[in-house]
Amino acid sequence: MADRESIRVVAAEIEQDGRFLITQRRPTAVLPLLWEFPSGRVEAGETDEQALTREIRERMDADIRVGRLSMFIKHEYEDYDLDFCVYRCELLSEELSRKRVHDWRWVTPVEMDEYEFPPADARTVRALLEDRGA
């Protein structure tokens, strides 16, 4: 059996006033129109922090300060393995754009149940809710 592709993805857990920033994938993306924490792939030669800073700038035209790792999940999709790292981040920009996301929302942990997330993200949301007693 051939080695499975392993992809490392970093995501930003950004909280303001008890609400978390989630973004919606574009209709043309893999897993279209599902919701997720702002995230992206780590490219060759990048640290997690560099990748996350670049991805948020590219997707939402925003700057962040990357904090500590809050969650790590390994998830097996049908065709590849995903190493999913979630970092607590501080949003430095006052404005967000829909540069490379379909939509974005600020939601409370309880409201996250109203949004459909990809499997790895759904596990992250469950862990976040458990951590906060929601």
Image: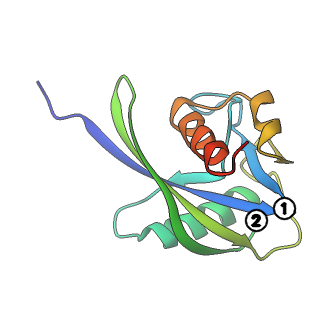
Circle 1 — which element? Answer: loop
The quadrant in which the C terminus is found is: top right
44 or 113: nearer the viewer: 113
Amino acid type at circle 2 is Asp
> Which labelled disc corresponds to residue 96?
1
> Which labelled disc corresponds to residue 11?
none
> What separation in Å lies between label 2 and label 1 (alpha carbons)?
6 Å
Packing grade of label 1 (10 A; few <14, some 14-19, many >=20) is: some
Identified at 44% across, 58% down, the residue is 42
Is 11 situated above or below 91? above
The quadrant in which the N terminus is found is: top left
| Residue sticking out furthest to the left | 1
Amino acid type at circle 1 is Leu
The residue pinned by badge 2 equals: 61
46 sits left or right of 110 in the view: left
Is 22 situated above or below 75? below
Is 69 situated above or below 41? below
Q: In the picture, residue 6 is in which quadrant?
A: top left
Q: Position of residue 13 (x, y in %)?
A: 65, 58
Identified at 66% across, 52% down, the residue is 38
Q: Where is residue 84 in the image (x, y as percent from the top left)?
A: 45, 48
